[in-house]
C-alpha cells in the first residue's frame, strides 16, 4: 500500500509527504532522519493520511495537497482521526 500523509510539526506547520510504510516514516521524521523540512521541527504527529494502490497515485495526491492553502489542508485534517494507527 502507498500513503499520502500530513504531519503537524511542533511549530504548528504542516508537512505533506508519501510513503509505503506510514508508521516507519513518521518514526523516521521524529528521529530527524526524514525530510529536511521536519528535521528542525520535531516532534511531528500524524494528523491525516490516505491510502493508494500505486506509488504514482500517492505522489500525485501529495503534489495536489502541497498546493492547497493551509485552511484547505486543515479541513482535510478535521476529517481524520489519526489514533486509528496507534
Image (cartoon, grey):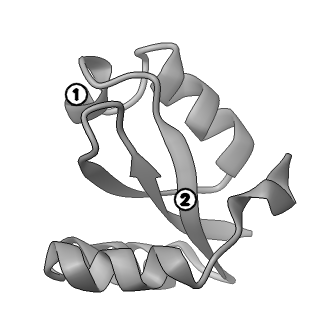
Which sits in the foreground, 78 or 63? 78
Residue 3 at x, y = what percent? 60, 67
**Residue 72 appears anywhere in the view:** yes
Q: Residue at x 26, y 86 (%)?
A: 72
- Compared to residue 53, the image places residue 66 above or below, namely above
Residue 69 at x, y = what percent? 14, 80
Q: Is residue 70 left or right of residue 57?
A: left
- Tell me the tag on residue 47: 2
Q: Is residue 71 left or right of residue 3?
A: left
The part of the image, by quadrant, that contains residue 45 is top right
- Tell me the tag on residue 11: none
Q: Is residue 11 left or right of residue 59?
A: left
- Compared to residue 13, the image places residue 3 above or below, namely below
- Compared to residue 22, the image places residue 44 above or below, namely above
The part of the image, by quadrant, that contains residue 39 is top left
Q: Residues within 10 Å of mark 2 (few under 14, many from 20)?
A: many
- Compared to residue 43, the image places residue 69 above or below, namely below
Which sits in the foreground, 32 or 70? 70
Q: Which residue is mark 1?
A: 36
Mark positioned earlier in the residue sequence (1 or 2): 1
Tag 1 near tag 2, CB within 8 Å: no
Residue 31 at x, y = what percent? 51, 13
Which sits in the foreground, 24 or 71? 71
Between tags 1 and 2, which lies in front? 2
**Residue 64 appears anywhere in the view:** no
Residue 68 at x, y = what percent? 18, 82
Q: Residues within 10 Å of mark 1 (few under 14, many from 20)?
A: few
Instruction: Kindly state the secondary structure of the residue where label 1 is placed.
Output: helix
Instruction: Kindly state the secondary structure of the residue where label 2 is placed.
Output: strand
Amino acid at each position: 500500500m502507498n500513503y499520502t500523509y500530513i504531519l503537524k510539526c511542533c511549530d504548528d506547520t504542516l508537512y505533506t509527504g508519501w510513503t509505503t510504510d506510514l508508521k516507519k516514516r513518521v518514526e523516521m521524521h521524529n528521529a530527524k532522519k526524514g525530510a529536511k523540512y521536519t528535521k528542525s521541527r520535531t516532534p511531528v504527529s500524524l494528523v491525516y493520511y490516505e491510502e493508494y494502490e500505486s506509488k504514482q497515485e500517492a505522489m500525485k495526491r501529495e503534489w495536489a495537497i502541497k498546493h492547497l492553502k493551509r485552511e484547505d489542508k486543515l479541513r482535510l485534517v478535521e476529517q481524520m482521526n489519526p489514533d486509528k494507527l496507534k
